[in-house]
Amino acid sequence: MGLNKKNMLGGTTVKLATAAQMKEIDRIAMEERKISSTLLMERAAKAVVKEVLALPYPRKSRMSDTVWVMKDGQEPTAQEQEIFFKRRQRSAVVFCGPGNNGGDGVAAARFLLEKGWMVKCVLVGARKNMSPDCKEMERRLKNVGGSLEEFQPERWYEYSEGDVAIDALFGVGLDSDLRGDAIEAVRFMQSAQWVVSVDVPSGIHADTGEIMGHAVQADVTVTFSMGKPGLFVGKGAVCSGKVVVADIGIPADLLQDGCGVTVMEQPVLKKRQRDAHKGDFGKLFILAGSRGYTGAPVLASRAAVRSGAGLVTLAVPEEIYPIIAVKCDEAMPWPLPEDYESILKKASECDAALIGPGLGQSEQMEDLVLRLLKDLKCPVILDADGLNILSRHIDILDKREAVTILTPHDREFSRLSGCALPIVDRLKAAREFAAQHQCIMVLKGYRTITAAWSKKCVVNTTGNPGMARGGSGDALAGLMAGLLVQCKSEDTIAKAVWLHGFAGDLAAADKGEYGMGVGDIIEQIPYAMKKCEEE
């Protein structure tokens, strides 16, 4: 297969860094490379302002009960309203903390003021706690006619008037729940047409994505130099909106490593050789299905076929073979014989095995799965009931020399690892389990995480709520297995997760998130893969 346990997740390019790493990078840039801290702050502010200026005009009237009326008594058309908003002066309310994140906000207020915007800049916190750079930005703001006002919650109506609210309360260093005026400020921000957060939405833990009591719901988050894990996982991914990683002039050599977490971009699939035959694209063995669960194996095998696998054998219990045989026209259904050696021979002839979709957990099936895990030398993907069986015999996983890929959702992961629900830090949990058990962990859910034993991992950003339905995981397992037998590149598993989510996005665009089905996702797999083919 060309796959080994050295590195399975290479090839992705968007690196992330923890809060501690970014603080150290900033320190080196300023203290050792002698880059002015105020220069970096102004570059950060300009990046924020660039995104603010790019925002569309107001999405709605701030006063929801207002009815716009023209001189002739008629309501204006959408085009007339657009002309009105373009002619009026745009406005922003900038909520600043006393630290350097607040300094970014004060500098952004100055730049917007110079662009002709109406700007209200508010200090949320004690003035005595202002950092030196934040004070310097206040001085520069005053020089152009602006001011940094004290936050007064009773004047709520003044803080709810802006087209844009800029959240510059806290940066990456927040490690405790929001309280007091910060909570009020967060509430007022949400009245704006648009909310732009500086570096990290206030209230979001930069490393885990956890909400620290309360959090800003941003439309855009402008983060600096490198992405932060908390912007892409957990509730942080929900609260961050569009994430823009801005270059503020930190030397490139300081940004090489990161924390071992990357964000999956659109993968590349190699063009097929003109003289290729089916044997060149791998043989897959799928063990799946049981009485009452005939859909899962069919969905998995269809996804494997759509992925381009050369030969797909679908091994099912003999009692459901007639049903499966009718449903399968491209995968090859195979009734399980009673003798184990025949099953092992069939599976060993293949390049990889997928075990688990709809399999059931009978004593007989549990024995078969455990024996195959011990004896198979090829990569094995465990899904659904394959995971449930493994959770009672985790020692089998530790003894395997070949690659093992696990695909649990959070509840299945809890059974495997003993981790309590809800999982607060999914990144840490997935990485530690993969390292401890020398496997690849695909922790499914919003922003699926693919972690390898080296603790390197990839966060996926494709997919949508329409995929949250029974059978979607079967399709992912089949796609992953089908790609595994034919693609020898290091990032095969993460590629499959991306393609599955993108196929779901294509299905949603075609039929909507409510009406789309798993079959629609599978039908879109070829189109998702076509987009990724080399030119």
Image (cartoon, rainbow, N blue to C red):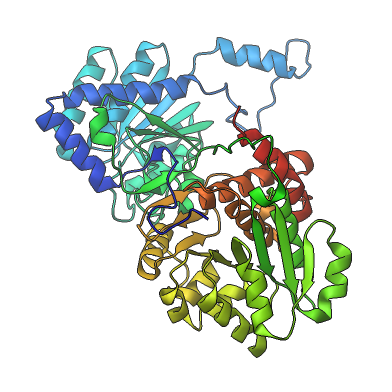
> Hey, which quadrant is residue 249 in on the image?
top left
How far across and down, in percent of the image, does residue 58 sit?
58, 25
In the rendered view, would you say 20 is above or below 390?
A: above
Q: Residue furthest front?
A: 275
In the rendered view, would you say 393 is above or below 296?
A: below
Residue in the foreground of this view, choosing between 429 and 137: 429
Residue drawn 65% across and 83% down? 340
Residue 13 shows up from this direction: yes
In the rendered view, would you say 302 is above or below 377?
A: above
Residue in the foreground of this view, choosing between 410 and 234: 410
In the rendered view, would you say 418 is above or below 434?
A: below
> Hey, which quadrant is residue 82 in on the image?
top right
Residue in the foreground of this view, choosing between 219 and 435: 435
> Hey, which quadrant is residue 312 in on the image?
bottom right
Residue drawn 29% across and 29% down? 104
Residue drawn 83% across and 61% down? 328
Residue in the foreground of this view, choosing between 314 and 247: 314
Residue 361 shows up from this direction: no
How far across and down, in percent of the image, does residue 469 sit?
70, 60
Q: Is residue 287 left or right of residue 108?
A: right
Q: Residue furthest bottom?
A: 363
How far across and down, in percent of the image, does residue 486 sit?
60, 50
- Number of marks in picture: 0
Q: Is residue 33 left or right of residue 140?
A: left
Q: Is residue 467 left or right of residue 267?
A: right
How far across and down, in percent of the image, does residue 270 sit?
58, 37
Q: Is residue 122 left or right of residue 373?
A: left
Quarter of the C terminus within the rendering: top right
